[in-house]
Image (spheres, helix red, strand yellow):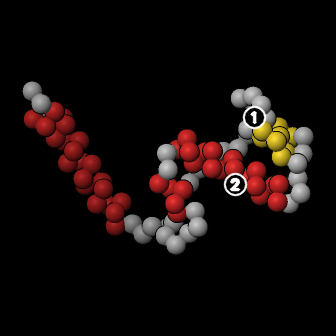
Amino acid sequence: MTPQNDTEFSFLSAKSLTLKAGYDAEENPWADSPFEWIKSKPSRTIGALGERLIAAWFAGRGYSVERSGDSEADLVIENLRTEIKFST
């Protein structure tokens, strides 16, 4: 039996298309935003971009910014270990 003939698959496929129609009708809140391009990236890449944006923002304001060197924090900003979370 192929997945296309499976009733469960058919049900989920139809439901997916119904849900898609509702989401396609929504206005894109990111349209014309300088951050819109980030939305097309994988979540892991989005997280890395968030770290880079925050690091640049703090460094551009004269704060010392370093990588933490371990997985317990992302950055060390002004000697404060900092975990960055970036979600769109």
Residue 61's disc is none
Estimate how packed mark 2 is, as few (under 14), some (14 to 19) or many (20 or more) residues with alpha carbons within 10 Å: few
Determine whether label 1 and label 2 are within 8 Å by CB.
Answer: no
Kindly state the secondary structure of the residue where label 1 is placed: loop
Q: Quadrant of the C terminus?
A: bottom right
The residue type indicated by label 2 comes to Leu
Disc 1: which residue: 73
- Nearer to us in this view, 61 or 80: 61
- Is residue 85 shown above or below 31? above
Q: What's the residue at 66%, 45% (across, down)?
A: 85
- Pinpoint residue 27: horizontal percent, then vertical percent: 42, 69
| Left or right: residue 75 compared with residue 48 | right
Q: Residue furthest bottom?
A: 32
- Pinpoint residue 83: horizontal percent, then vertical percent: 73, 40
The answer to whether residue 7 is seen in the rendering is no
Please identify the quarter of the rendering in which residue 4 is found: top left
Q: Nearer the viewer, mark 1 or mark 2?
A: 2
Please identify the quarter of the rendering in which residue 10 is found: top left
Please identify the quarter of the rendering in which residue 38 is found: bottom right
Disc 2: which residue: 53
- Pinpoint residue 57: horizontal percent, then vertical percent: 77, 58
| Left or right: residue 47 compared with residue 73 | left
The residue type indicated by label 1 comes to Ala
